[in-house]
Image (tube, rainbow, N blue to C red):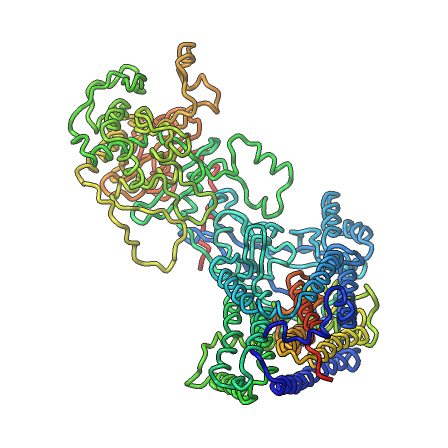
Amino acid sequence: MKRTEREKEFSHRVITRRGLLLGSLQLGVAGTLLWRLRDMQLNQAEQFHLLAEENRINLRLLPPVRGLIFDRNGVLLAGNEQNYRVVIKRDDAGDIDLVLSRLARLIDLSDEDIERARRDMLRNRPFVPVTVAERLSWEEISRVAANAPALPGVTPEMGLSRHYPLQGDTAHVVGYVGPVSERDLEALEAPDPVLMIPRFQIGKSGVERMQEDALRGRAGSQRVEVNAVGRVMRELDRVEGTPGGNLHLTIDAKLQNYALERLHGQSAAAVVVDVASGDILALASGPSFDPNLFVRGISGPDFRALLDNDHRPLVNKTVQGLYPPGSTFKMVTALAALEAGATNGQETVFCPGHMDVAGNRFHCWRRGGHGRVGMVAALSQSCDVYFYEMAQRCGIDKINEMSTRLGLGIRYDLPINSVSAGLNPTREWKRRNRNAEWLVGDTVNASIGQGFVLTTPLQLAVMTARLASNKAVLPRLLRDPMERAARETASLDLRPEWLRLIRRGMAETVNDQRGTAYSSRIVADGQVMAGKTGTSQVFSITRAEREAGIRRQEDLPWNRRNHALFVDYAPLDDPRVAVAVVVEHGGGGSSAAAPIGRDITLAALNGGVPPLSAYPAPQRNRIRAEQIELEERLRPAQLLRVSRA
Amino acid sequence: MSYLEYNTKRMPAGLAKVLYVNWPLVALLIAVAAYGFVMLYSIAGGSLHPWAEPQLKRFGAGLVIMFVVAFVPLWFWRSISGVAYAVSVLLLLGVEFFGSVGMGAKRWLELGPLRLQPSELAKVTTIMALAAFYDWLDLKKTSRFLWVVLAALIALVPTFLVLRQPDLGTAMLILMGGGVVIFAAGVHWGYFAAIIGTGAATVVAVMQSRGTEWQILKDYQYRRIDAFLDPTLDPLGAGYHINQSMIALGSGGWSGRGFMEGTQARLNFLPEKHTDFIFTTLAEEFGFVGASSLLLLYMMVMGLCLLSAFNTTNRFGALLIIGVTGTFFLYFAVNMAMVMGLAPVVGVPLPLVSYGGSAMIVLMVGFGLVQSAHIHRARLPS
């Protein structure tokens, strides 16, 4: 706005006055700053200089004790053991080569250890302590302590380090810890200062990693006065940290151990789920590996050996392994057909050994055909043609729906890595991923769990538990030890008469003479099981190959053979456990997978190596021989003792 | 007010403007920035990388920007003040809704390849808006309640938005910068007394109520306040840094340990040694002489600018200068007080010295405005 000269002058006066006021205020503040600076730098300079040079106050972080991991009964799966180690600081050591060579005369150090320590020291900033040797004996650590004057910069320390007493048994579930890496730090927004402690270990895989926050605890701190050579003169104050929380898994360590040993030598997976609660009692993926190797820092050759092993020990096949479910999927197709009203379950279908669909011939596994079969017989004898027919009647959409309802194609929320969702192929999926329309042949393939369908062993166990209970069982791995009441599980709302048909089919699979798993039946009272075998093609034997004489799986190299699958639940009339077994390239479900499923089921029901009386009399001698061999590999009882107070 | 209102007869135009630049101020700014280059070179262990060289380039760019801003006539800046303010508030709202998160706070707005930090922009535009507001407002209405409330709102809106990001340091700078302009414009001191009084009373009430039945805040909130005021209560976080900072600073003595002789090892524990804690290194390596001379330089900048403000009858120009320098003052005063353990730890850099681009460019724009007000000042009738 226009202002008169008087107004301008007034404004100028006001601004000048206020500006001078502000200026003097600022001058005052600056004076205070200067005074403080003078006070610190001139009056107290000597004090601070002393603090800086001779008596530095060091803040030390006290690493928290990591929480323990127990199995469902209180058996220790992951603990902490005392660990004497020697650390060295470059800026205190001076001539590091000299100090290291002196140290090598006192304790056992390989050239590789020395080289690694040198490298670590030169790579880190000079004041960062580098661990030279770990897991020393008391004598060794005493020798280092006694020779301290000749070893500047070297400090003997006692720390805790992670230990997995059951070694490979729960490696895929519990996982392992390792030193914090730069990548770990970058991934965090505000890293806990405790992570900066050299060699501090955090969860790298499995429960250790996914439950890191619960297990780690909070660091304490200690302010100490140290002299120029870094020796602690006195402790000024101390804030205690809080130890990490303990975790209880649903795993039964004894059963887990048995299951893993039962898979011995095979590339295979076995899952046991508690039908009522969804608790995962065993999650065995064979072969396994010793997580303690990773805690100590695995050597190059050891790691190479794990990577190069064609049985892939590092992969958790129970949740990561994707397998076509083969005939174990037939329950899904059967229920989908019933639900869609495509059959009443009583009618029969004629199986001539093959079926022609849209110009293609689809074979039944039995070349000669099954003749007339109803649903129960189709399940127990695993007739493919019956399901080809049913699938065409109800369509892929219904099969998808039922598959999801039974827990397939879903990623379970579990605290372990790489839990796969499997694949529940839909029309939409094929359009998007294969850029092709869904064909009736795809439906026919899916009906017997081939084609695009992929499941994990855990999903198959959950499916079986759902069939056994008619409840929407969800697997879980963590357990609240205070929990008293059983979890409420929603009903699946499958019609009881349909479920009865399915269950009869599964019961006859194992207990009827014509059933595919008859040789794996259980005869003990109250432990009889129901199950379903599956054999899923990895590579189909082409017509050309078939004509060239390759008919039997044994003629193929190991990694081209079929996967063997078996799912079961037991006891028949009051199901408690559901089991799924997948043997990679095992050949046939009934020969390779069903006996394993039977033994693990019995172990789960009996809490240990199954009694011989559970097996049909003619098999007992052979089974006893197998058991003796297996018992030698089982973990000693004291490791499976309850260690929780 | 149109540009005609300036005393055009004595107003420099074209290249002649170069002669009217406040050259002593330019020299002082370069001197201050030189402290930064030297320290960044030293902290990097005697290397232009990774900090000194980018800082040099940025300061060079800042100088160019300052001159560009300076040569644009002041009436232009006045006429766009309102729009600039509106745009920066919109950008702040943009951060609120679309901002990208980094280091636990939302501060950046990504517009294609551009990364904007609207809170930095708001520091300058709030001051511009308030200066223009008081330039427009009838002098008689300056202290009227509703007009004071309006002015307060101009400062509070961006403050609140920045506080939500959350960025306490910047929010405080915006609010105080605005407060300085309102104060300089001549708003009755009673308003300030009332606000300071109410604030003090609230603080006293909140702190006194602790442990009584009518306790106002929750226990954990009190603990947070404690840790904020006394960092030693949080020995793992801020307290550790302040402790190390004070030891290093104090041990500098009269003339310091010498260039590049600072106890790097210990300072390496300071994560912000090249940004917020750079004054510590300066005080350690160059002692009281180095630290107080920088303080002196800063105060000379303040003095020159205030003189320039007193020498113009252009209300907008004078208020602009006082606002920009007020913010500048807050920067270095808060930063120095923090590293000396006199103030809580808030992330405020040492202006023109700390490593960092956004704040430096904005400051140089601010000084460009100061120069523009100086060049295009309305001369006092002699």
Which corner quadrant of the image does residue A517 belong to? top left
Q: In the picture provided, is A92 more to the left or to the right than A423?
A: right
Q: Is residue A87 above or below residue B326?
A: above
Image coordinates of residue A610 in percent, x first then y, are: 36, 38
Q: Nearer the viewer, residue A475 or A83?
A: A475
Q: Is residue B174 above or below residue A156?
A: below
Give the quadrant of the C terminus of chain A. bottom left
Q: In the picture provided, is A311 more to the left or to the right than A332?
A: right
Q: In the picture provided, is B342 more to the left or to the right than A537?
A: right
What residue lies at 54% left-to-right and 82% top-to-bottom?
B138
Give the quadrant of the N terminus of chain A. bottom right
**Residue B270 visible to the viewer:** no
Image coordinates of residue A310 in percent, x first then y, are: 53, 30
Image coordinates of residue A150 in percent, x first then y, are: 81, 58
What residue lies at 50% left-to-right and 46% top-to-bottom?
A166
**Residue B214 visible to the viewer:** yes
Q: Nearer the viewer, residue B191 or B309?
A: B309
Q: In the picture provided, is A72 more to the left or to the right than A177?
A: left
Image coordinates of residue A347 in percent, x first then y, are: 16, 26
